[in-house]
Image: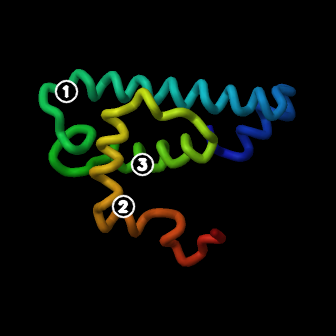
Amino acid sequence: MTVSRVRRFVTETLGAGPAGEAAWIAHWTQEGLGRLEAMLAQRPDPFPFCYGEAPGWADLHLVPALRNARRFDVSLDSYRRLLAVESACVGLPAFRAARPEAQPDHAG
């Protein structure tokens, strides 16, 4: 959803313009996050991470997905489970070290 080339296709080739691009990003971001939120609601135990007591593959993708949602002003109000998982992740050293602003080539 946040790949520049795809966004250009939506705005330029499909003629959606900036408002269409924003609607497209919001729709598909909420579609994916909503499905994951629903999956986490069905867990038998409320783990601190998506699927266990330690972060896994889903968590590695969730944190940047939420970051991008914020970047594009997508509301996260209805994803309390995802936000709780994100909160558990962002304090961990590996997640802090992986943030874009922690990279030596980050343009800021």
- Looking at the rendered structure, the secondary structure element under dot 2 is helix
Tell me where residue 46 appears, x and y as whole percent: 17, 34
- In the picture, the quarter occupied by the N terminus is top right
Q: Residue at x 31, y 34 (%)?
A: 81
Please tell me which of labels 3 and 2 falls first in the chain.
Answer: 3
Residue 63, numbered label = 3
Please tell me which of labels 3 and 1 falls first in the chain.
Answer: 1
Q: Residue furthest bottom?
A: 104
How dense is the environment of label 2, judged by Cα within 10 Å: few (below 14), some, or many (20 and up)? some
Identity of the amino acid at label 1?
Arg
Residue 17 is left or right of residue 84, and the answer is right
Identity of the amino acid at label 3?
Val
- Looking at the rendered structure, the secondary structure element under dot 3 is helix
Identity of the amino acid at label 2?
Phe
How dense is the environment of label 3, judged by Cα within 10 Å: few (below 14), some, or many (20 and up)? many
Residue under label 2, please give it: 95
Q: Residue at x 72, y 46 (%)?
A: 4
Residue under label 1, please give it: 43
Q: Residue furthest left?
A: 45
Residue 33 is left or right of residue 94, and the answer is right
Q: Residue at x 39, y 31 (%)?
A: 79
Label 1, label 2: how many angstroms apart (C-alpha)?
Answer: 24 Å
Tell me where residue 103 appears, x and y as whole percent: 52, 72
Label 3, label 2: how many angstroms apart (C-alpha)?
Answer: 9 Å
- Looking at the rendered structure, the secondary structure element under dot 1 is loop
Colour basis: rainbow
Above or below: residue 14 compared with residue 50: above
Tell me where residue 98 appears, x and y as whole percent: 43, 64
Asked if marks 3 and 2 touch (Cβ < 8 Å), the reply is yes
- In the picture, the quarter occupied by the C terminus is bottom right
How dense is the environment of label 1, judged by Cα within 10 Å: few (below 14), some, or many (20 and up)? few
